[in-house]
Image (cartoon, helix red, strand yellow):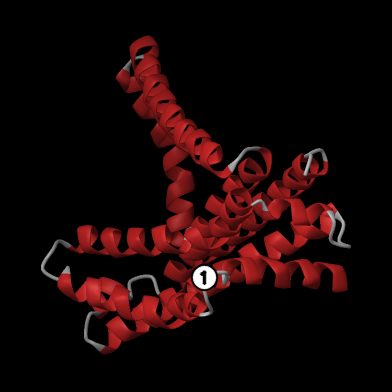
Amino acid sequence: MNAIMRAFRLDMRRFNSQGRYMLLFFTAVMPVIMVAMALLMNGMAVGAAAAGVNGAFYGVFAVIPFYVFIYENQSGAGRLNGIIPVSRAHQVTARYLFMLAATVLFCLDFTVYTLVMNLLGHTALWSAGGTRTIAGTFVGYLVFESILYPLLYRFPAQRALVVICGAVFVGSMGIVALMLALVTLLGEARVNAFLDAVVAPVIDALAADANMAAVLAVVAALVVCAVSFVVSVRFYSGKEL
């Protein structure tokens, strides 16, 4: 445990390499900026305003775990990992602990932002779903970082971003191509019948008990994180520092 905390503190120093104001910015200033953005976007459609603010939140907080890898790549600080008295498995554990801390910080800031918007009278726009919205925030952020981390251990940071963007693009196009192929081969009526018979009942069941759906989503995200951790340890164990 001491070794993990030693590596965790090292990652915190890397994150704060530009000054402690960085942590203050993410903990205190970000909710204020997001509230200001939401108020400025209040004239937009509900979906567009919510998507804009949520996207900004995700974009900014994605930098927190990513910055540590960037720091290692650009400054050569990654070589230090080969000489500190901490095993590689413990270093990866500390990095995932850092990711979980960033996820919790993200959810706390998002909660503060939502509560402030409620106090300002925007309950219909910003509090729909309540705890389920927070659970969705947790799940989305944790899954994204869990997918990104093994790539960052396998490739340099810039290449990892190219890989994940390419994978998202190819995957999206693949889904569209698959749906078009199914409609062409089977006919639109059969595809719709399959969706109504198989997919729709699952969606309806989850919608009927949204709290259970949120719990299942959080559990699934933790499973994804665990698998990501195992893959990252394997990649990092074979990496030359």
Give neighbour class at mark 1: few <14, some 14-19, many 20+ (Cα, 10 Å): few
Horizontal side of 115 relative to 132 (left or right) equals left
Closer to us: 132 or 195 = 132
Pointer 1 residue: 18
Residue at far front of view: 75
Q: Position of residue 164 (x, y in %)?
A: 51, 38
Image label count? 1
Give the farthest residue toward the left.
Answer: 43
The residue nearer to you, when weighing 189 against 46, is: 46
Residue at the spot 51% in from the left edge and 70% down from the top edge: 18
Q: Which corner quadrant holds the C terminus?
A: top right
Name the amino acid type tagged 1: Gln
Q: Considering depth in this image, is 205 or 44 the residue closer to the camera?
A: 44
Provide residue 21's location: percent of width, then percent of height: 48, 79
Decide if residue 226 is on the left or right side of residue 66. Answer: right
Asked whether the viewer can see residue 209, the reply is no
Query: In this rendering, is residue 190 above or below 59?
Result: above
Name the spot of residue 39 as percent of width and height, x first.
19, 76
In this rendering, the answer to whether 77 lies above or below 185 is below
Would residue 112 be visible to someone looking at this image?
A: yes
Q: Residue furthest bottom?
A: 119
75 or 3, nearer to the observer: 75
Is 18 above or below relative to 156?
A: below
Question: Which residue sits at x=61%, y=51%?
Answer: 146
Q: Secondary structure at mark 1?
A: loop
Q: Which quarter of the rendering shows the N terminus?
A: bottom right
* Residue at 39% from the left image edge and 10% from the top image edge: 185
Measured from the top left, where is residue 171 in percent x and y?
46, 30
Question: Which residue is at 38% across, 20% downward?
Answer: 177
